[in-house]
Each structure stands twice: as structure tokens, then as C-alpha cells.
Image: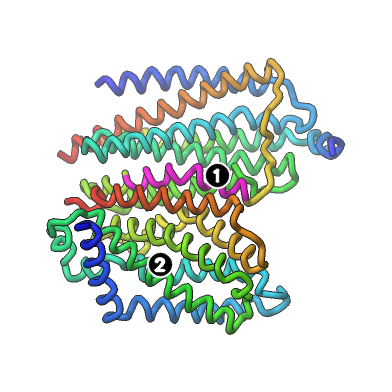
Amino acid sequence: MRYLSIIFLVLKKELKDEFRRKEGIVASFFFALISLVLFHFSFDSGVGDISQSGAGLLWLIILFAGTLFIGASFKKEEENGTFYALLLAPVDRGAIYLAKFLSNLILLTLLEVFLLFISYFFLNIPIFNSPLSICFVFLLVSIGFSSLGTLISALLINERGSAVLYPLLLYPLLIPLFMGGATLTNEAINSKDIRSDPWLHLIILFDILFLTISTLLFESAVEE
Amino acid sequence: MKIKSFAMITSIIAVILNLFALYMVFFYAPIEIQMGAAQKIFYYHVPSAISSYIMLFVSFLFSIIFLVTKNELADLWAYAGAEVGLVFILCVLISGPIWGRSAWGKWWVWEPRLTTFLILFLMYFSYILLRTFSSEEMKSKRISAILSIIAFLDVPIVNRAIALWGSVVHPKKVALEKEMWQTFIVSFLAVLFLAFSFLLWRVYIGIYKERKNE
Amino acid sequence: MSEFFLQMGRDSSKYFYFSYILIGVIITIYTISLIVRGKRSRKDG
């Protein structure tokens, strides 16, 4: 119970802070919008129906836009030097990780809802063909993205060149997740049944594996 | 120094085995009827792939040991394993497309195992980048250890994902003649010993450097 | 299909040599880099 209440407390603090500062959210939402417009213009001539290949584009945008705030998860602690204060608190560090993870997951979900809406609006990607499957797929991929993203972000606290290193370290690890996301989203858009798809099992495996591993390894990632 | 004599012995064995293996590859092994001489790339391509997996496993294992015991020697082994693994990944990535060019007429095919090695290359290259950029502190070593563990656990998932993605060009079973098997076993041992001698020398150099810093 | 492979096979030894030369180059470069690093750390240490 105590564990859960700690997670909830830190999560509340995180979200409050994030919505007060707004820079992460505004930057990523605006980035998503710009990318969508750019993609439209770079694909407009001759490729044909963008709604067919749209899923892959959506995932690329989510990857890049999500990096903007997930990569900066520990930025404010780094700047204010409050990270050690957070660590000094007599709480389980796994709980701190899970709270950060959940906060990133919530922001990512908001970003995805926004992106899906504008992609429906601008590009006619038929997201309402099977909304439940789409929500499910997006949630699963977001869990994997947020779990590894938060961990790598914690690893690079106070590290030289962390802004450059972050995507270099994270993106190769995420390749299978995003391959699965793009395939499943395409299938869901085309109203196929994804429940017995092997990609779904793979993504679930990825989520469970890396959420567990990250919670366990966070302790040794931040200890001083 | 114990590790130095080990390294010396393994490298001598590796050199002898490699000369022997090269002789067998060039003169003893028969030419395969379908793919011709290009099939002989196999004798170093496949052992390099297996050796690189073994080296990455060494890195994974010693990363766990390092996180548990905080023993700096374990970190040296983990670093060495990843670096030598990367060298052999590079060998696979270079010989693979040449073989592909000869057998399929294309340099690069997005094919499960080849693509897996490309992603392996990306992951472990970023590991080496991290180690070169960051300082020699305890914290950077911990970061690297965690990265090595995550990357190694990701390998089977990457492999499965790419297998789901595309078609299979690599044969599931390889039917080889007796002479081919003999050549393969010798060249496999040769590459394996080469990898281990690299590993030992790399650790030896690391120990030297560590002592200098103290 | 097998005819295609047979035809490719006739001049495929150049690929064979090419790939062994490149592997040799990689291995040599890495060996040299190990030797250089070893010498340097010995000199300083």
C-alpha cells in the first residue's frame, strides 16, 4: 500500500510540474503537427494513398516527439540539483522509477490522442475502423517506449553529451517495438483482427521484460 | 602475469589454427556446385557470427557480475567482450553482403539474420560510443553495464521481430559433405580462438591502463 | 533456378577472395590497434 501511495504522490508531483512548465508538452505537440505537415508535402506527389502507409509515419512521429520529453525526464532534477534530494527520500527507488514511467506514459498517451486526431483530420487516416484495437496497440507500444526511455534517460543524468547519446542508445533497442507497432496499426486500420497476431505477443513480451528489468536496474542506475 | 601467458598461448594456437583453416578453405574444401567458390565465405562467415554472439554473452555475463560485486575487473571483461564482439559483427556484416551479391545478385537483402546483425551492430556501436565519450568513473561503468544487459536481452526479440517481418533466405538446415564439415570445424575453432585471444589481450591492456591510473 | 546459380558460380571466386581479404583487413586493423594500445599503456605505466 505504501509503495502505491509513494508512486501516486511522485506521479502527482511530476504531472503537476509538467503541466505547469508546459515546455515538454507544447514542444512535442507542436513537433507532431509540424512533422505531419512535412510528411504530407514530402509524400504528396505520386505515392498515392497516404492512409495505407500512414501507420509507419505515425510511429516515427511518436518516436521523435516522445523523445523530446521522455529524454528530458530528469532534466529539471539535473538543473536544480534536486535529484539527490529525490534519492535521499526514504522511499523505494523502484517506486520513483515507476512514477516517472507512468507520468511519461500519460504524456505519451495525450500526445498519441492528439496525433491520431490530427492525422484523421488532415490525412484521412481511418482510425475509427477499429478504435479499440488501435487504442490497445498504442497503449502497449507506449508502455515499452516509456519504460526503456525513462530508464535510459535516468542513466544519462549528468553525463557528458547526453543529448546526443540519448537517441543513439535508445532507438536501436526500440526497433522491434516500433516494427510491431507499425504492423499492428496498419492491420487495425484495415479492420483486421489482431488478437491472435504474433506481433501482439512479441510486444507484450517486450513490455513485461523491459518494465521488470528497468524497475530492477533503476536502483543501480542512480546509486552514488 | 597470469592473464598475459594465457593470452600468449591462445594467440599462438589461434595463429596456427587460422593458417591451417585457411589452407583447408583454399585448397582442401570442395567447391560447392550451386554457389561456386563464393560458398567458401561460409567458413569464416558463420564462425564469426557464432563467436560474436559468444563475446556479447561474455559482456552480458560480466556486466551482471559487475553490477552485483562492483568488481572493476568484471567491468574490463564486459568492455572487452563488447568490443571484440563488435569486431566480429563487422566481419559478418562485410562478408554477408558479398556472399549475398554472389548468390542472390543483390548486395543487401532485408533478411532476418543479416538485419539482426545490422541492429546488433547499431546497439553495440552505441555502447562503445558511450564508453568512449564518458569518463572513467564508476558511474559510467554502471551505465555501460546496464546498457549491455538490456541490449543482450533485446537480441532474441529483435531476431523474432525481423523473422516475422520478412522472408527467410538462410537455410534452416545445411547439408554439407564430409570435407566441408571438417573444414568448417577447423575454421570455427580458429575463429573462436582468435576471438578469445583478442578478448584476453584486451583485458590485459585494460588492467595495465587501470594500474597506471591509480 | 539452379541454372542461374550455376552461371553465377562460374565467376564467383572473385567474391570469395574479396570477402577473405576484407575480413583479413578488419582482423589486422584490430590486431594493430591492440598492439598500439598495449605499447602506449606500457610506455606510460
Residue of label 2: A67
The residue at the far right in this view is: C3
- Is B172 placed above or below A212 here? above
* Chain on which label 1 sits: B
Question: Over which residues does the magenta segment extend?
Answer: B146-164
Residue of label 1: B159
Viewer-side residue, C41 vs A180 = A180
* SS state under label 2: helix
**Residue at 53% over, 50% down:** A201
The residue at the far bottom in this view is: A121
- Per the picture, the main secondary structure of the magenta-coloured stretch is helix
Residue B156: percent from left, percent from top: 50, 42
The numbered disc on residue B103 is none
Q: Is residue B153 magenta?
A: yes
Residue B54: percent from left, percent from top: 45, 32
Q: Could you say which quadrant of the image residue C2 lies in?
A: top right
Residue A149: percent from left, percent from top: 38, 60
Looking at the picture, which amino acid does disc 2 mark? Thr
Q: Is residue A34 left or right of residue A188?
A: left
**Residue at 32% over, 19% down:** B5
Quarter of the picture holding the N terminus of chain A: bottom left
**Residue at 52% over, 31% down:** B50
Q: Residues within 10 Å of mark 2 (few under 14, many from 20)?
A: many
Q: Is residue B31 magenta?
A: no
